[in-house]
Image (spheres, rainbow, N blue to C red):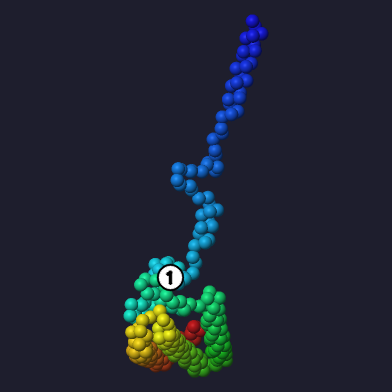
Amino acid sequence: MKKLCFLTVNFLLLAIGLCIKAEPTSPTPAQATIVGPKTKVNSPQQQAETAKNAPKTVQLGATAELVRAIMGSPIGQIQSRGRSIWMYECGSVEFKAGRVIFLNLLSDEELAARRIQDEWSAADAKKRKLQQQAEEEQQSNVLFHESKKNASQQASTQASRAYRKSVADRTYAQRKAAAESSYEKELARIENQYNDSRQRAIDYSNSVTASRAYNRGERMDAPKQLSSELASLSNSYSRDVEAAKSRCDASLKEAEANYKSDLENIDAVTPEQTINVRYE
């Protein structure tokens, strides 16, 4: 009887052990995935692959919203006969019925090369200007300190006047050069913008005239439309040039007035200021 009870207990313990081993383990949070009847959550790798395959450049047929999302807001727009042309630093995008129908864009390499060239030119010009200023300041400083050391009160006063005049001359030259440089840059920008807009208008007119995608009326009106647009661009170019010249003349007049005021103030230097004048 005891033997039978012992076997029965062993049998029960064995059955309990098998049940415990057969019970499925709960997934860890890192292993758990949520899968519904018709929905499956993409893994991080799948999401990254989807983002990688998303369009990164504008293509024909793209919407205005997609172009704005990829390239940002345009720097200018032209509306003509149901078409819209967006201008960017790297070129232009033409729309019809809310879709891209023509692209005239620089590649990333071409745009990067142009930006690097501009940065190099600006850095080189700034370097030359700083070197010239340093040489002029060094010469003025040497002249002033030598005169102050070896001359009497009168000579020191003359040295102070010469120093202050050199400062006034240099300041006037810098202001004048800055105004002229700003005018030249503005004029170059206006001219480049006019040439680009003019060429785009000509290319567009030629494409309308030669393309079968436009109807006969549009092809016949293309030269007239081009002539009108070129006249408008020419008038706008003349106005922009005149405005830039007016701003340059105003800056030059202001620099000249400040220079005259600086020269008048040179005579107001006292002997104490002559002795204690500082190199600015």
Q: Nearer the viewer, residue 73 or 254?
A: 73
Left or right: where 29 falls relative to 92: right
Amino acid type at mark 1 = Gly
Residue 118 horizontal/vertical position (percent): 52, 81
Residue 53 horizontal/vertical position (percent): 52, 61
Q: Nearer the viewer, residue 107 or 12?
A: 12
Residue at (36, 77) in percent of width and height: 83
Q: Residue furthest top?
A: 1
Residue at (53, 61) in percent of width and height: 52
Mark 1 = which residue? 61
Q: Nearer the viewer, residue 88 or 125?
A: 88
Q: Residue furthest right?
A: 3
Question: What is the quadrant of the N terminus in the image?
Answer: top right
Residue 231 horizontal/vertical position (percent): 35, 91
Residue at (48, 47) in percent of width and height: 40
Residue 239 horizontal/vertical position (percent): 34, 89
Residue at (42, 75) in percent of width and height: 101
Identify the secondary structure beneath mark 1. Answer: loop
Crowding at label 1, few (<14), some or many (≥20) Cα neighbours within 10 Å? few
Residue 56 visible to an observer of this rendering: yes
Residue 168 visible to an observer of this rendering: no
Left or right: where 117 falls relative to 92: right
Q: Nearer the viewer, residue 171 or 202?
A: 202
Q: How many marks?
A: 1
